[in-house]
Structure formats: structure tokens, C-alpha cells
Image: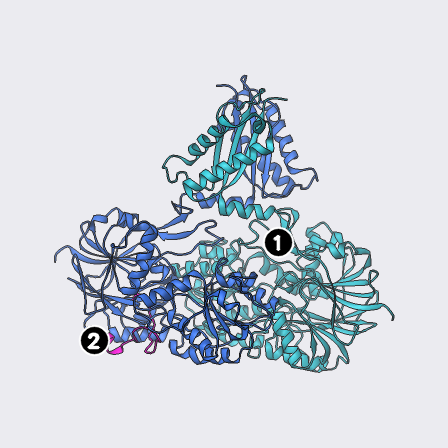
Chain colours: A cyan, B blue
Amino acid sequence: MAGERLVYLPLGGAGEVGMNMYLYGYGRKGSERFILVDMGVTFPDMDSTPGVDLIFPDIEWIADRADQLDAIFITHAHEDHVGAVGHLYERLKAPIYARKFTAHIARLKMEEHGYDGSEIETIGAMPEQVKAGPFTVGFQPISHSIPESSALIIDTPDGRVVHTGDFKIDETPILGEPFDRQAWGDLGPVKALVCDSTNVFSMHPGRSEVTVGPNIEKIVAEAQGMVVATTFASNIARVKTLADAGIAAGRSIVLLGRAMKRMIEAGVATGVITEFPSTVSPEEARDIPRANLMLLATGSQGERRAASAQLSRGKYQGLSLKEGDLFLFSSKTIPGNETSVGRIVNALSEMGVDVIDDKLADIHVSGHANRPDLQEMHALVKPQFLIPMHGEHRMLREHAKLGEAGGIASVVAPNGTMVSLSGNRPEVVEFVDTGRLYLDGSVQVGALDGVVRDRIRMALNGSVVVGVLIDEEDEPLSDAWVELRGLPETGRSKAPLADVLEEEVGQFLGRANRKTVMDDAKLEEQISRIVRQSSNDEIGKKPEVTVLISRLAV
Amino acid sequence: MAGERLVYLPLGGAGEVGMNMYLYGYGRKGSERFILVDMGVTFPDMDSTPGVDLIFPDIEWIADRADQLDAIFITHAHEDHVGAVGHLYERLKAPIYARKFTAHIARLKMEEHGYDGSEIETIGAMPEQVKAGPFTVGFQPISHSIPESSALIIDTPDGRVVHTGDFKIDETPILGEPFDRQAWGDLGPVKALVCDSTNVFSMHPGRSEVTVGPNIEKIVAEAQGMVVATTFASNIARVKTLADAGIAAGRSIVLLGRAMKRMIEAGVATGVITEFPSTVSPEEARDIPRANLMLLATGSQGERRAASAQLSRGKYQGLSLKEGDLFLFSSKTIPGNETSVGRIVNALSEMGVDVIDDKLADIHVSGHANRPDLQEMHALVKPQFLIPMHGEHRMLREHAKLGEAGGIASVVAPNGTMVSLSGNRPEVVEFVDTGRLYLDGSVQVGALDGVVRDRIRMALNGSVVVGVLIDEEDEPLSDAWVELRGLPETGRSKAPLADVLEEEVGQFLGRANRKTVMDDAKLEEQISRIVRQSSNDEIGKKPEVTVLISRLAV
């Protein structure tokens, strides 16, 4: 229709791996109706976000248009797709649709925020569909590393959009629906394929989940002492493979870590898993010979508080590792987590525990489509347009090149890029401000608010607090008082740094003119300058300075 | 001789990759004579050492026995082997021996610390030897990723020790001495092989430096726009290979970054490199068509201030990248640096620059011996003992297992483990306190001094400064004053956090008894507790608190 158009707008997940959130809109510019796909989080690190608890996409753009939002769809229950539902729902308040298992996890998250879970509507796979404004949306099963992952088939007045969500091509996924080439080839004319890009640089065809079982089984069968295995708790198929290998070797299975238990429970409750070996509690395990035990532990990414890290530091729930035990990382280390995972591996090595990871044995497969699999997906769906999503910029760009090389009009659209899908080529029509929101303790702060920047500065430069007291006649009273934090006690002169700074500030106050002393801002600025300069002379660092001026005059 | 013994004691580099420093001693316990091998640094990170400039081994143990130290030997000029010479020499003051190129680099470092460089003595390769107390030491050429790398052949009254330094088995290293299997097989009876362990988990035989040339040449020949390549500046062979590929493709070569120029100059000055293509300056390069340019840039590990990172952010010395250009990482990303390297790659992707790294093409080889090469080294040297060094604990342990499997008595000896080599098996005889020393600005602080710990706490928790004023009668005067840093301005109650805290502290002061108010420590402790508690209620974080108490009473 004249003036109406179909647009795609990623708010998170395009230009990064994490915090997935994608908008689709249809209508005239300014009065579109929208649906939102996924509400994910990403995780903080010391480098850029010290002290932050979680990171969300900044949803201001759509929150300002919340009355234009008809529905929210969650493709699967990974944190980078569902983790933000409870935190951000209040500002959007549209109905949330998901399949059974995903809905179960999403409801738990909503309940943590005081909702009753009725905000989440459970919907079955295609052919079931949801009508949301001008959109008709169905969940198309697709294989991934968590049960019930789904692509979205989004029918619009301007054609069909296929939003893959996260996927791999796996016809033997152990749990959940096998990839159905027939169904994917039968989607009919597809205007746009919005497609996972994570593994575009992995050149070989991906391997099926079923391939890791025999390798794990062999390793566990040959192990002498206790065996501990870690993997992503949400990869229930893998957890089951590990448990089955333990049982086959005559071992009792212990689940360690909340996420591990919660995911199995969710799987059982929603029927995505029907048989899981019976487990024993950590208490019961203490009475079982270690050669007959297999622990399945959370924390494959080296998370400090998870079961794996705690085991590497000593006891966890009364269980501990010792020489001759075996530890399996049935997982890959996500880039950025190498150091924390390495810390665990080396601590285990110090205990005499053997470690086998995905580099030493084929005990892990990725949940994402590799380059040849992406090409197969393109060939199956035969879309008019390709929009790479779920990836760093280099991955989106490479994936778009791959599409173009295959004759599909492709566009690199990082977060904030609004692309019109209504014409004969995808067309960038607008750039929208996007960004990040931090959950910091219990407060949401903007990434650009300066809060975290100030913390980074204190971490790099240390902190000096200076107290000065000004009397009723605007004369400095007594000496300045300096407190250091995160700075060496002495420097070049060998005198205590605090004394040196107090002396320097005292001298300045002695010679400062009345106008300066009367002016808080000026006084603060000059004292800061002196402290930074003197510190630099003494210790080669310019600290962050806080000046507290107390005035007796009222 | 009765009571005399030969000992090995790593102070750094055993149980980590970095800051190599190894002691050998001979004599009666307590009156040994020592030699020190290498004085390396390791690099800080935000996770554990924010704001730190460099990390050294804590040398207290040997500094306390500096009069027993006869000599220092530097195997090669990598920072993790030579980086600490200038910083720590003052506490050791033994003569330093190195071969020509390494000595050149070491002298530059000494000069930066006000020495004249005469502390470094240049010595030739074997058969030249240095007598140092009971030790006779020769430099045995060995292939690695820097010119003139050397193993040390250490003859002692209790037999010959071979300290490999860093090495690979490379008979065609482009620059410097090829690995000489004959010479290595002819070392005669060797008591102990102290051996590089870095790549013990790499299962395939290592590749020669010569193998990367043709691949690089092909890529550069096919490139259309400007080509930028980064690698470790000290890998002069690689820099030459890259430059040669540029020249072969009709491109002018530009060296970007201080380290790049310094290494080439050192190579030319010491004769380890005789032919290096002529280069043009960045100024001259601006007048050359970009298709005829090849830039060789520092910063392959993503270092923020190096040339590569600066190019990824915009201009560097008047040169900038644009769509159609090509960027080569002829390097591997050291674990822990993935995020910073990824940042550069994605920034380049946003510019439309293609990036090729060691995963996409064979344009890098490691400088360390892989597992089969280590086995070959064991077989060539046929030592009685194997002591793995230069590696994380898991690498040392794996390497020791490899030795034992080959019938060599092997011992895992992480930093601080003193091993006697005098008997029929390596025997751990003592554990010595070791640790880390931080260069923080211009000051050396101990890793356990708490300075960095306090900075990390501020980064995680933010900081609150509270000023209170107590009058001559020990009564609180006026309200408390609160300043926040690195904390959100408002929390649960929507009132400014600083106001809430001032109010809480004010109320406390109003009800506090005289005894508390008179006692600085008690007052500080209670105010801190209140601030942490109230902050937790408001923002879900317990900040670091500094309390400044000003008393008018004298």
C-alpha cells in the first residue's frame, strides 16, 4: 500500500554476540505497528563494565512507542534471547509469545520480578500462528543447543520474513526436533532471511550433537577416579549425553549448580525431555566410591561462583576433587573467558586432576551453523534478501558477502540500522540511536551516564580524598587531610604520600587568595590539580581526586 | 662433594606464561653460588591488575642473597625474558651476559634506567663460554621467533644442564641459525633438560617460518587497495617476509610504531639482519597510491596505543584505512587478548576493510615447539631428568607426563619449587616464597600490598566519601556531606542517593552517644556501616566508604 513499508530494526545482537533484540515494523513512517523478537542480555567484564551485573539493549526507541508494539516473541531460552524479559517488560507491556519450554523459563524470570507469569502466552509450533497487528507469526522448529529453539515465520503484507533465531543444521539433535530439510525447502517465496551469523568463519560443515556421545562414553568408561563434566546447563541434550555416559560406566550422577537442576526440571516439566537418568544428591554421593561417581557441574565459562570454579578452589557441597580424577569441559570457551577458564584448568592441574576439553577430544559441537550450513540454509530458503544478524560486525559483513556471492541481495545492518524490506533491494532508511543499559546492583544506568567510566578511572588511577576546613572568616582552619585508596603509601621521596600531599595542599591554602578560598569550585579545581601533579611527581600516577570542603560560615 | 648440591629454582615463568626468571645454584645449603637465567616481565590486565604498568617476579629471595649471585644470562630479547633488567638490576648487580642482538636490546633497557649499558657483556655462541662461580655457561643457538635465541649449556660439578629457553625446531628460520639437529644430538651426557612447555598441547609437528612466505606473498599480490600487516615487532624474520611480499607486489614499505623500527634497527646494528628492503616514511607514503603501499604496524595483540589499534580508530601518522583495503594479522592472539584484538577487527570491518588472520590463512607459525617437537628434543638430548618450564601449570604437568612416558625422570616444579638435580632423580628440597611485584606508575608495589585490591574494589563497588565536622564540645556540627563516585545518582526511592545518605548519616550523628562521637575509629566504622547498608537498600550495592572526620577541638 502507498507509503506503507516493512522495516527491520535491530536494537541488540547485530554487531555483537549477545543481547539479541530485533524489531519488525509495518505501516507508514511514524505510525508503524511493531513486533519485537527476543529480549536478551549480555554479560559484563572488568575491562569495560566493572561492577555491572547485566547488560541490556537500550530500549528507549521502542519504549517511546510502546503503544505501537503488538507482541513480543522469544525464539529460545538462552540468556542472550530471554534474559531481559523480567527487567524490561514494564516499559513495553506487550504480550509475550513463546513455545512451552521457553515460556516456562521466561515465566520463571517474570516471577523473579513480581509478575505472575500470565504475561507469557504459550504457543505451539507451526502451523499454529499468532496474529499481531499486520503480522502473522509462527514458530518453526529449528535445531540448536537448547530444546525447542525456533525460527519465526513472519508473514506481512509485503511478504514472508524468516527470522532464523540461533540455529544449526542437525538431523540428530538427541533432544527436540531434528532439522527438517523438507519443511525448510517448502517455505514458499521468502522476501527476507534474517539469519544467524555466529559461525560464518567456521569453514567446515557443522557436526551433529549425536557425534559427541561415543567420544564422551569412551572417555568416561576409561576413567579411574571421579569424573566431573561441565557444559552449558541449557544444553539439556548434552547434559543427558554426559549423564548417560556416566550411567553406562556404572556411575551415579550428581547435578551440581542451580542452573543445571533448573534446566532439567524445566525440561521434564514441559516434556521436552522424557527420560533423564536418576540422580543422587551431593550428600548421598559422599557415601559412594569416587570411581562410581560422575558430577555434572555448572560453570563451563569459568564463572567464579559456579560449581566448576568452586570445585577447582576446594570443596563444593561436601565434594572435592583429587589426584587421579578427571574433569571434562564439554563446551567451548567463549572469547573473553579464556583467562577464567584457564584459572580453573590450572587449579585442577595443581590438584593432579586430568582435564580434557574440546581441543583435546571431540566432546563438544557448536550450536550454530558453520559457513557451509549457512550456504545450505540460503539454498533451502531461497530468499530475495539476506540480513545477517547475531554476530559481531565482521561476521555480519562476511555473511553478507557470502549471500551476495550466492546471488542474494544482502545488507549489513548493525544495531540501530532500520532497513526497509518493501522494495526490490533491502534499503537502509534510517539510523536510530541505540546503546546499552546496565543493571548495576538494583538500578538501571545508561552506558553513557559516566557511572562505570568513573569506576574504571578509580581502578586505573586510584583515589585521593582531600578534606579542608574553612573558618567563618574564610581562612583555612588547620591542615588539609588526605586519605588514599588504591595508591602506594610512599613514592620517590620515601615520605608517606599522604603527608606529602597534605603538605602541598597546606602550602597552597597558605598562599591562596581570599577569592579562591571563597569559591568552592575554584578551590576544588586547584586542589585537585595540585594533588594530581604532586602524585605524579611522587608515584608517577595522577589519581582521581575528591575534595570535601567544610565551611564553618553559614 | 659431600653436602654440595646442584639446585634449580624458578622465580617466574613456571606455572604461567610470562616473566621468566630461573635460578641455578651449586654448593652447600645456605652458601650456594647462583646464576640467574632471564629477567622477564608479564603484562597486566583489567581483571586482576588494573592500572598496573608491568609485572615482575618478586626477587626478594635472590636479592637477599645478591652476594651469592655470580652472573645473569639472558637467552633472548623477548620482553618476558629481558623486560625487567632495567627495573630490577639495582637489587642484584651481577654481570649480565647475552649474545649481540639480545645485549643490544638489554642495553637500551638499562639506559632507560640511567645505566650506561656496561653492565651487559656480549658473548658469542658456543664454543665460547663464561665461567661464573661453579658454573660454566655457553650460549647454544636455537630457533625461535626472534633472532639469536639461545639455549644455555650449563656445566656444573654435578653434570650438564641444558636450559632450552624458548624454542622451536626450525631448520629454515629465514633469519638466524637453523636448528642444528647434529649439534643437539652431540651435547653428550646431559643431567637435566629444562625445557620450554608452551605448546605441549599442540599435537601436530610445528611448521617452519619459511612456510608462511608464499601464502603471504600470494595474498599481498592479489590485494587491490592498501595492505597493512601486523606481527610481533621482534619477529624480524616475519617482518622481513612481510616486507619482501610487499616489495614483490610493487609496494613501498612503511614501518609504523616505535617497536617495529627499534627492532629492525637493532637487527641491522648487530648484523642479525643484513638485507631489509628500503622503507618510506609515513610522510612520503601520503604521496604514493594506496595500491602501492604496504604498512607494517605494531599492535598485533590489540594494544590500545599501538599503530594497529590507532589505525582501526582513524588516522595514524597521517595514514588511514578505507574500504577495499586489506589488513593481515600475521600473528596469533595470545589468550586473554581476544577482546582487544576483536575490537580492532570489528572496527576495520565497519570501515569495509578485509581482515585475514591466522585462522583464515596460514600466515603465522608459532615460535614454540609442539608436542612432537618436544619429544624430538627429548630424544636428541637424552637427558637423565626433564624439568618442564615456560608454561602454565597444566602445560608443565602435561610435559612432565610426556617425559615420564618417554622414560625420563620428570618433575613439575612451579615457581618457588627448589629442585635438587644432584641425585638419581630430581628431588624437591624446598619451597621458597615467590610472588609478583607490580610497576605501578613509577613505584614498585608488592602484589599482596592491597593497593591493587583496593582499586578493584572501587571498580566493582563504587566509592562514597563522607565528611563530618565535630565541634569543640564533640557535637556534630552541621550536616554530613556525601560525595559519590562511580555510583548511580538515584535508586529505589528516586531521591538523590547523596541526599539519602546525608540524611541517614545525619540521623545517626543526632542519636550517637558522646563516646562514639569522640572515637574516630568507632565513628568511621559506624558511618561506613550505615552508608553501605543504606546504599544497598537504595541501589543494591555496598560501596567503598571513606570517612573524613574534621574536629574543631585541638
Image spot of residue B89 (x, y percent): 29, 51
Q: Where is the N terminus of chain A found, in terms of image quarters?
A: bottom right
Mark number, residue A34 = none
Range shown magenta: B163-184
Expressed as whole percent of the image width and height from the top left, the position of residue A536 reads 45, 42
Whether A399 is among the magenta residues is no
In the drawing, what numbered circle is on residue B186? 2
Residue B224 position in % (x across, y down): 56, 77
User: Where's residue B358, x and y in %?
Assistant: 48, 73
Q: Is residue B478 left or right of residue B138?
A: right
Disc 2 is placed on an element classified as loop
Work out which residue is located at the far top of the displayed protein and give it.
Answer: B473
**Which numbered dot is residue A54?**
1
Q: Residue at x 51, y 76 (%)?
A: A214
| Amino acid at the residue labelled 1 | Leu
The answer to which of A211 and B434 lies nearer the viewer is B434
Residue at mark 2 to residue at mark 1: CA–CA distance: 60 Å
Please give left or right for residue A60 compared with residue A241 in the image. right
Viewer-side label of 2, 1:
2
Q: Quadrant of the C terminus of chain A?
A: top right
Majority SS type along the magenta span: loop
Picture layout, residue A379 above or below residue B365: below
Identify residue type, mark 2. Answer: Asp
B170 inside magenta stretch = yes
